[in-house]
Image (tube, helix red, strand yellow):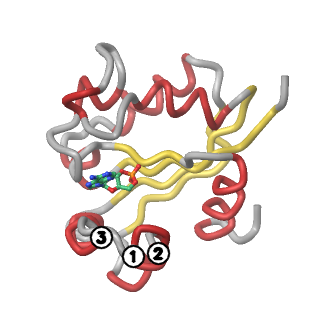
Amino acid sequence: MAIERTLSIIKPDGVAKNVIGKILTRFEDAGLKIVAGRMMKLDESLAGSFYEVHKERPFYKDLVAYMVSGPVFVSVLEGENAVLKNRELMGATDPKEAAPGTIRADFADSIDANTVHGSDSLENAKKEITFFFSDL
Ligand code: CMP
């Protein structure tokens, strides 16, 4: 199986709930290694360009406003099938639909305050990792 890297963001609600450690432990317990990590406060320009792909979606403005509302923890996870594994650990985007035991089912409040972001494909993972960690 392929060793992959994927980008994870613990969103403002996850940081505010003081569950960074609990979430990182889930990644580690699933066999993913945290190979880079940084606490950041995004500004509108950075959050806006990170989510550029959603620019035409009706939720874009609220999403960007939410992502700048507090600090986030950005990290790079590495391991076998990291992209899919991380998405399984996160659960569905809308916490109401997230399977029991997933990060979003356990911690998230709403579709915007959904605690974590994870790359949705290997191709996007490469772009998202370079976006935040230009040295990787
Ligand atoms: P994330 O994985 O960070 O990717 C884009 C984000 O947009 C998503 O998580 C949600 O927090 C947010 N969002 C808000 N409304 C929607 C929607 N209808 N569909 C998908 N994502 C949405």
Disc count in the image?
A: 3
Asked which quadrant contains residue 43, the reply is: bottom left
Q: Residue furthest bottom?
A: 45
Q: CA distance from mark 2 to mark 3?
A: 9 Å
**Vertical placement of residue 39 versus 29, above or below:** below
Q: Can you tell which mark lies on residue 55? A: 1
Q: CA distance from mark 1 to mark 3?
A: 6 Å
Quadrant placement of the C terminus: bottom right
Callout 3 amino acid: Tyr
Q: Secondary structure at mark 2?
A: helix
Callout 2 amino acid: Glu
Asked if ligand 1 lies within 8 A of label 3, the reply is no
**Vertical placement of residue 77 versus 62, above or below:** above
Q: Position of residue 68 (x, y in %)?
A: 27, 71
Q: Position of residue 84 (x, y in %)?
A: 61, 31
Q: CA distance from mark 1 to mark 2?
A: 5 Å
Decide which of 91, 103 is in the foreground and name it: 91
Q: Which residue is mark 2?
A: 52
**Vertical placement of residue 10 versus 31, above or below:** below
Q: Which residue is mark 3?
A: 60
